[in-house]
Each structure stands twice: as C-alpha cells, then as structure tokens.
Image (cartoon, rainbow, N blue to C red):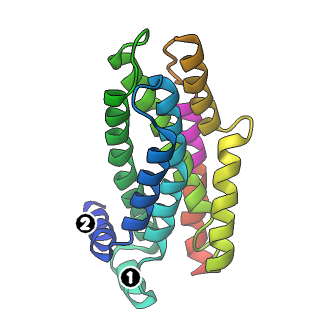
C-alpha cells in the first residue's frame, strides 16, 4: 500500500492538478478570515472551506490515471487496493493543508478568552471531521459511481453544500460548535463529529471500492 500511495501522490503533484483546489482554498480563507477576529469562528470557516477542497482532491486522484495505466496498476496490485490508495492519497494531501490553515488562522486570530492551545485543538478536530466528510463526498461523486464529468462535478458541489448545512452532518456539527464557541467565548471540542465523519467516510469508501469490481 505504501508504494501505491507514493505512486498516487506523485501523480497528483506532478500533474499540478492540485493547484486549482489549493487556490480555491486560499481564496476562501482570504475572503472569510480576517486578522484580529475571534479565532474560533475563523477556524470554523477554515474547516468548512476545506470540505469541498478535499472532495475535489479525491475526485482528481480517482480520475487522474489514463485507463491503460489504471488497468496495469490494477493487474499488479489489485483494483480495489489501487482505488483505495487513490482516495487515501487525496486525504493525506488535504489533512496537512488543513493543519497548516489551523495554525495560520490561530496565529492571526483573537485568542482572548479561549487560548491558543484550546483553539488549535478545536480547529484540528473540526478540520479532521470536514476532511473525512469531504472525502466521503468526493468518493461518492466520482468514478466508478459517477462516470460523467459534468454530473460528477454538479453532484460534488451539491453534496458539499448539503454536507455543510444538513442537520446530522458531522461537518455541520463541528463547524457549528466552533462558530457557537466564538459567540460564547467557550472552547468546544467537537469529539462526536469525528467518529461520525470516520464512519461516513468508511462507508463511502467501502461502497466505492466494492463498486470497482463490477463497474470497471
């Protein structure tokens, strides 16, 4: 699996397709985050913005190989393992991006009343929940479940929006906890969102990996 992860990550980095999601995230942060504002609210926005970015990265990784190359890798390592490696590569690229954003937002935000360590802990938990939820969204709206590029992109945008506003969504729970904490000056630790996001991502990945056996 390590070799497959390295292969998928190298493909992503060399293709420079990661540049568009990175620029999107930078623009969203520049618009939503201001220096000196309450840090918890800013961290909530930063985590929420990472959800569609993660979904986009998953979609890129699942579609970046030519069909011939994908068949060769599947023959050498197994189609399911190759598919799983592509999803994990996207998540492993999104997670450090979110961690850097948490540290950066905490550095420029107003931490009075909450403290930097508490803000970082809350931000990392919310970011992890949004990354996992974004991975689920990207997995469910990409091949082999959705092959049409147009429908796939439309479904990704809609599903990302729903994941951020639908009651019961782990991402919404985590982001809401931080935004509410900014108003009450209390440090929330959205632990319940993390296992929920993990279960959602695991179910989406399991469905997608299994679908590779009968749709490709």
Q: Quadrant of the C terminus?
A: bottom right
Q: Is residue 147 visible?
A: no
Whole-percent x, y for residue 132 in the image: 51, 46
Look at mark 1 in the image and give the residue it sits on.
Answer: 75
Q: Is residue 29 magenta?
A: no
Q: Which residues are magenta?
A: 193-202
Up the image or down, 188 lies above or below 6; here it is above
Whole-percent x, y for residue 166 in the image: 73, 41
Look at mark 2 in the image and give the residue it sits on.
Answer: 3
Q: Report, in whole angstroms, how far the alpha carbon at label 1 lies from the one at label 2.
A: 15 Å
Up the image or down, 90 lies above or below 215; here it is above
Q: Could you tell me which residue is drawn at 39 percent across and 26 percent down?
A: 109
Q: Could you tell me which residue is drawn at 56 percent across and 61 percent down?
A: 139
**Residue 128 picture quarter:** top left
Is 88 on the left or on the right of 13, as rendered? right
Q: Could you tell me which residue is drawn at 65 percent across and 43 percent down?
A: 164
């Amino acid at each position: 699996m390590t070799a497959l992860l390295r292969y998928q990550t190298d493909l992503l980095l060399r293709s420079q397709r990661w540049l568009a999601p990175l620029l999107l995230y930078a623009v969203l942060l520049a618009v939503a985050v201001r220096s000196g504002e309450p840090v918890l609210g800013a961290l909530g926005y930063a985590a929420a913005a990472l959800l569609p970015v993660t979904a986009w990265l998953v979609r890129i990784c699942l579609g970046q190989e030519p069909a011939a190359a994908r068949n060769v890798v599947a023959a050498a390592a197994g189609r399911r393992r190759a598919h799983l490696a592509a999803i994990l590569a996207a998540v492993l690229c999104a997670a450090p991006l979110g961690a850097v954003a948490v540290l950066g937002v905490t550095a420029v935000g107003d931490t009075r009343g909450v403290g930097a360590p508490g803000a970082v802990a809350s931000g990392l938990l919310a970011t992890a929940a949004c990354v996992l939820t974004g991975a689920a969204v990207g997995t469910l709206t990409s091949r082999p479940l959705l092959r049409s590029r147009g429908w796939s992109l439309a479904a990704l945008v809609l599903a990302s929006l729903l994941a951020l506003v639908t009651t019961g969504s782990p991402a919404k729970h985590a982001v809401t906890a931080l935004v509410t904490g900014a108003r009450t000056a209390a440090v929330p630790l959205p632990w319940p969102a993390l296992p929920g996001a993990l279960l959602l991502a695991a179910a989406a990945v399991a469905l997608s990996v299994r679908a590779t056996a009968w749709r490709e």
